[in-house]
Image (cartoon, rainbow, N blue to C red):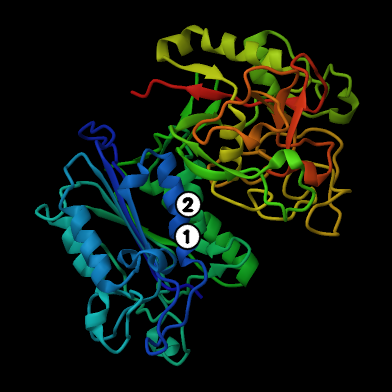
Amino acid sequence: MRGPIAILLTLGFALSSSGMSFAADRYALLVGVKKYGSSSGLRSLEFTESDVEELGKILLTTGFKQRNITTLTQTRGIEDTRFFPSRSNILKELDNLLKITEPADTVLIAFSGHGVKFKDAKPSYFCPMDARIGDRANLLSLDDVFAKLKDEKTCKARQRLLICDACRNDPIADQAKAGDSVTRPTPLKPPGGIAALYSCSEGQKAYEDQTFKSGLFFHYINEGLRGAADFDKDNAVSPLELALYTKREVKQRARAEFQAVQLPESFVNVTEFSIPLPGLFRNSIGMKFALIPGGEFMMGSPESEEKRYTSEHQHRVRITRAFHLGVFEVTQAQYERVMGKNPSSFSSSGGNKDQVTGKDTGEFPVERVSWEDAVEFCRRLSNLPAERAAGNTYRLPTEAEWEYACRAGTTTPFSFGSVLNGKQANCSGNYPYGTDTKGPYLQRTMRVGSFAPNAFGLYDMHGNVWEWCSDWYDSDYYKNSPVSDPKGPGAGQFRVLRGGSWYVDAGFCRSAVRYGFSPDYRFNGLGFRVAAVRVIE
């Protein structure tokens, strides 16, 4: 069962009536409470911290800067007590954030933890880490938060959305169950000017999902904000789209996974605003790109990682600037449109056409392309009139950019964990990794985007086709490479390939695996994705 999670989003909405553009500055306060004291009357929750951390990653892809995101969790508080999610800390950070806002700014406030709704009181309360159910002075009233957001003296940001992942079942039944969230089945209609989305209807519970490692509703909120709720493909998610998406997905998942009814509820003025996704854009031929924020990570693999190679020497790398990267591998249709031909083996006229009979392979990754072919594709794409007019140019990602984007904040062998057997990505499931259970082996490529994306919204970073990078390959380069924005040695014999492909063992698809081939080499397991250098409006 899920404790209440309240997220107050004012995401720089573009007002359809006034033509307001993107926010000048974007700020976020994210609060996740995982553990409560023995006297609190509340049990610990599992995924509250990871939910707000994941939301923070998504915000970075939509134009938020790392320095403008403050995250309060107990894990962070161990290193600096300022970040403990106590009531006093939350109020202090909230006031500090709101007082610097301007009308064009974006403000996001997220609360993740338990909550209570007393029978004899109007407000719902959020429970900080020092909460005690019997002492309301230790709780945080959501009505007070609403008041701060609505009052122009404390918050000048004009567009506001409340997303509340909360149990809304009868407290009389739940008070006898130690640790359950205590919520009263009363509609939590927001004050004027604030739209609201809730995880369930009155009398229902909101669940945590062990498979997703997330609150069930929160999982689909995050997926929706990544773009899954962008039904009209306008690179923006409206509150109505987000409401419709979460209602559909949560209802189906709760019924299938928990044999329960969890039906999200919303209060939305659909004509007021939408949530722009500035980190996503489509170019003139329909290629979709995600904004990958700058940051630091450990490149390579630890010595304890199974099947690692010495060329994966682990070292710290800093990506100093955000960049756009293709959400998908370049497809056969896209390659043919730019280059005037389709060299792919897994196509209607290719050498392996019998394996794809009856399939529309236009959305399969292009393969049998050399590094030289990929560079030429980038050159021709950059020279298309529409791309020149937009100021967009294209290139292959560096090896460091590729692995940083692939990992998306993870340290496990794969961005989705430590197990791969062909069910999580397109590879040879006959030779699994992290498990003895064999999985599918299709013996061919498959449609891009057939598996779940990573936390940056990128698909097929593992398997399907190897992906060319811009760097020359050197097995010892990591030992002396620069920390900031490494670009590989200045010369060499081979160019870097990353990600594995449909025909290799699962272990070759690990995030850290590096390979090299001659830049003129072609075969049906070699493809690529491109990075975009974009002039942002």
> Residue, x 53% and y 69% (percent of image)?
208
Q: Residue furthest left?
A: 153
Q: Which residue is mark 2?
A: 222
> Residue, x 64% and y 65% (percent of image)?
256
Q: Are marks 2 and 1 in contact (CB under 8 Å)?
A: yes
The amino acid at mark 1 is: Asp
Query: Crowding at label 1, few (<14), some or many (≥20) Cα neighbours within 10 Å?
Result: many
Q: Quadrant of residue 203?
A: bottom left
Secondary structure, mark 1, is: helix
Whether residue 201 is situated above or below residue 445 in the rendered picture: below
Front in this rendered view, residue 467 or 203: 467
What x and y, as percent, mark residue 503? Answer: 84, 36
Please state if 59 lies on the left or on the right of 470 as rendered. left
Q: Which residue is mark 1?
A: 51
Q: Which quadrant of the figure contains the C terminus?
A: top left
Q: Residue furthest front?
A: 480
Please state if 115 lies on the left or on the right of 421 as rendered. left
The amino acid at mark 2 is: Asn
